[in-house]
Amino acid sequence: MVPPQAAPPDRTFPARRLTVPTLVLGFFTVAGTWGAHRFQSDERSFGLGTLVLVLAVVACLPLAARRPHIAAPLAVALTLGYLALGFAHGPILFAAGVVIALATATGRPPVAYASAAAYAVGFVVIAALQDGAPTWSAAGAALAFGGLPVLVGLLLRTWRDRAMARRALRAAEERTSLADERLRLARELHDVLAHSLSAIAVQAGVAAHLLDRDPDLARRALLDIRTQSTESLDEVRSLIGILRADGDADAGARAPGADLDAIPTLVERTRAGGIAVDLVLTVPDGVAVADAVSRAAYRVVQEGLTNVRRHSAARAARVRVTGDTAGLTISVHDGGPPAAGESSPGSSAGWGLRGMRERVEQLGGTVEAGPDSDGGFTVRVRLPYAAAREGTS
């Protein structure tokens, strides 16, 4: 399907914005034309016909706001008719120029150019017929009355186009920012909820299985469910509270405890859910790990363990978080095939690995995820100590 083409920009002015300019132009045009007739005694006297012609030209100004292709030729025709009838030269010549300028700025330029050319040529011809021969002064006046309005209109048109382009750019940036915010919020909610809900589901299954055979173990599983759900609820409340407070792009990841120091607690909860986790967590002393990187490391481990629980038949996992001179290396490995009816995490269309990759790449890191030769699945992440874009995790 061919995408629809963007509509051309609307350069027309709202007619109501021209009410005051039209009244001002009308007043000075009528007053100036009346004065010109008083001081040019050899011209026709100022009467009702003169007033009608002058007001008709002025009325073309608001018409040019919506119908510039009509207003410009009409103003030129009325002005040339005014001159041909022998009325005194005056502000009406300027009024027609204002209409041409507005038509150039808002309408189709060829119509405005043709109107300006007709205005200049008609002015010279009428002057030649009335004076017996064209003069340089008439030619100069024609050039001024026809050319200057076009130049002013083109400048106004360029200024308006740039203003509209700036507004369009701001609107596009706002839409992009809103889309990024929605994506980040979805990623944060996924990270917070996916792990805890999957753990709760496992614990609930354990409790149901042991309820009759071993009530004590079933009770312990239910207590673990209560603890896990309470912690998750607190984390979600903190996330929403921070987002409401300041809308900071990093707010969602600042949930309490979601950093390197909280990884052992995360592993303990996973072990309580029935998965044996072998954890190695070593970060060199004296190394300053950026907050965003620390939080991202936690989320990587969290997502990796969630994938083990949801997608793998293995009941054991290996987690390694180690640091060297350049940054952190994080790996989460399970040694089992996908669980029955489940695809591997890498083939899932969900948010998990996609959100992890977005988070890590924003910080200048890399993600490798895929099946291993032993039939398991490994997620390996490399993160710099200093985030490339601090605050995006």
Image (cartoon, rainbow, N blue to C red):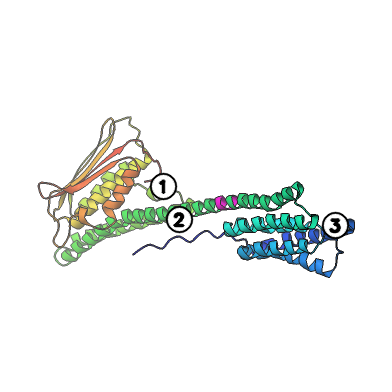
Which mark identifies residue 36? 3
Q: Which residue is mark 2?
A: 175
Residue range in magenta is 159-163
Lateral position of residue 266 relative to residue 81, left or right: left
Please name the amino acid that badge 2 sits on. Answer: Arg
Q: Secondary structure at mark 1?
A: loop
- Distance in Å between CA atoms under marks 1 and 3: 71 Å
Q: Which residue is mark 1?
A: 250
Of 155 and 260, nearer the camera is 155
Q: Residues within 10 Å of mark 2 (few under 14, many from 20)?
A: few
Q: Position of residue 324 (x, y in %)?
A: 26, 32
Q: Nearer the viewer, mark 2 or mark 1?
A: 2
- Quarter occupied by residue 178: bottom left
Q: Secondary structure at mark 3?
A: helix
Of 25 and 393, nearer the camera is 25
| Residue drawn where x is 14% and y is 58% of the image | 339
Of 126 and 157, nearer the camera is 126
